[in-house]
Image: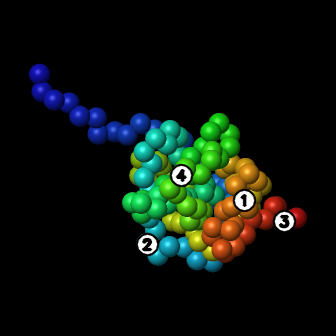
Amino acid sequence: MAVQVNLVDESVDVNSSLDSIVIINNIYSIPGGKSLDTTGYTSDVLQAGHVIIKETATGNYKPMPVSGAAYAALPAGHEYVGILNATILTKRPFAGVMTEGYVNENASPYPVATIKAAFMTATLNEIKFRGDLS
């Protein structure tokens, strides 16, 4: 019997409708973006507004780990670097990483309250978190 290969990807529901609501103002992003190391990340989709970290030893950029419906602790040997500026598939992790701008924390994919102070210190307060503006 001949080898068979599936050329059709499984369908994934990608909802990017909140991207422009989460990212209020993208002042500066890393030119050309970054390829993320998504090893161990179980979701099929990374939503705009997800916190991005970097492993200091390797320089690899990664999505911040999550535990349930919240961000997990920052892994040892990692630092905060920015915010994902558009929704992407985990299996194609070509990411725009915002390093200066405004994020609507009320529309972010995970609550930032527990990591906000450390994140803002690490990113030199170049990223501001704001609630919905009415």
Mark 4 Cα within 10 Å, few/some/many (few <14, many 20+)? few
Whole-angstrom CA distance, mark 4 to mark 3, is 35 Å
The residue under the point 46% across, 41% down is 40
**The disc label shown at residue 133, or none:** 3
Location of residue 12 in the rendering, given as x and y in whole percent from the top left corner: 49, 40
Which residue, given by chain and number where applicable, does mark 1 sit on?
116
The residue under the point 56% across, 55% down is 87
- From what the image shows, is residue 44 above or below residue 64? above
Q: Are marks 1 and 2 in contact (CB under 8 Å)?
A: no
Q: Is residue 107 left or right of residue 74?
A: right
Q: Secondary structure at mark 1?
A: helix
Give the foreground label among 4 and 3.
4
Name the residue nearer the viewer: 50 or 59.
59
Which residue, given by chain and number where applicable, does mark 2 sit on?
32
Task: Say whether disc 1 or disc 4 marks the residue closer to the N-terminus.
Answer: 4
Image quarter where the C terminus lies is bottom right
Task: Say whether disc 4 or disc 3 marks the residue closer to the N-terminus.
Answer: 4
